[in-house]
Amino acid sequence: MKVGIIPNFTREKTLDVFKDVICNLEKFNIEYCFDSESLRTFPISIDASKGCSDLYETSDLIIVIGGDGSFIHAAKDAAVHKKPVLCINAGNLAFLAGLEGNELDLLKNLISGDYVQDRRMMLEVVLKTDSKEKLLGYCLNDVVIARYGDIKLIDLDVFCNGRKINNYRGDGVVISTPTGSTAYAWSAGGPVIDPDLKCITVTPICTHSPLNRTLVFNEESVITVKASNNLQRICLSTDGDKSLELNDSFEIIVKESNYYAEFIRIKSDEFFDILNSKLTQRRI
């Protein structure tokens, strides 16, 4: 077994967790490597022989050390290469974490195979302008289409499989996976959805529309969002990435991706056990 390690050293706790991960992998004789390019930014000296130029290709699984943002970005890259990801928390809540920093002795389960892989649905996002379509990428949490710059309401028309569902006048909409139901969509008033389900949700953000609740569609649905008029400044962001300002005559097309994120779960905790535990931490 060969493990590719991706640490996010912008997190305060990452360095300590990173050192403990390395110690435990060596104790259990698990081979590991890092992305060659990223070695230059490591805050400690690492054996250069541990670098590899094709981390996702040569590794059997990926260990990510950080918070949910780190996990999401690595999981999308890993999904394209069909590699599972183990997330180790060095952040705050970290809903996607498979292990906490004080549970690293459980890394021995990687050798015995005593773990499960949770398969998470992802979305494909396409931008259509002037009859031309461009794949913007994939997301694990959500697609946010919202006002850009000015503090003014925007008007968005939302369609499902070509049929208009509603017009939303407000700050925008969040199109989410079940995994993303505990992210922005939840803050906007959406429901918590078991990530084992396959569905697509549309949640309005601070809307003046009469239909101001989350809508849930099956996984085969194709969701399209258009501007109701061309005198608006609107942007798009996927999984919290840098916003892209949209032109006057855009269409955003969102549907289920052919790729799935695979998260390694070593502990026996189920989704709602984790949810309750993390929310208890937030209340403390």
Image (cartoon, rainbow, N blue to C red):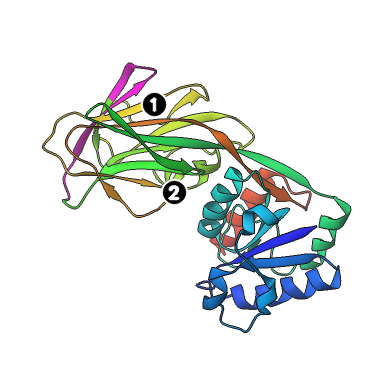
Please identify the residue farthest to the bottom as the structure is shown. Answer: 45
- The quarter in which the C terminus is drawn is bottom right
Q: Residue at x 34, y 27 (%)?
A: 224
Q: Which mark is residue 223?
A: 1
- Which residue is rendered at x = 72% and y = 70% of the image? 21
Determine whether, in the image, residue 229 is placed left or right of residue 143. Answer: left
Q: Are marks 2 and 1 in contact (CB under 8 Å)?
A: no
Element assignment for label 1 = strand
The rendered magenta stretch, by its main secondary structure, is classed as: strand
The answer to whether residue 42 is magenta is: no
Which three-letter amino acid code belongs to the residue tagged 1? Answer: Ile
Query: Front-most of 15 and 182?
Result: 15
Residue with the mark numbered 2:
239
On the image, the x and y values in percent for residue 86 come to 68, 55
Residue 154 part of the magenta segment = yes
Residue 63 sits in which quadrant? bottom right
The earlier-in-sequence mark between 2 and 1 is 1
Work out whether 51 lies above or below 175. below
Quarter placement of the N terminus: bottom right
- In the displayed orientation, state which residue is furthest to the left: 231
Distance from the alpha carbon under mark 2 to that under mark 1? 17 Å
> Which span is picked out in magenta?
151-166
Measured as percent of width and height from the top left, residue 192 is found at 54, 39
Tell me where residue 149 appears, x and y as whole percent.
Answer: 19, 53
Which amino acid type corresponds to the residue marked 2 in the rendered image? Asp
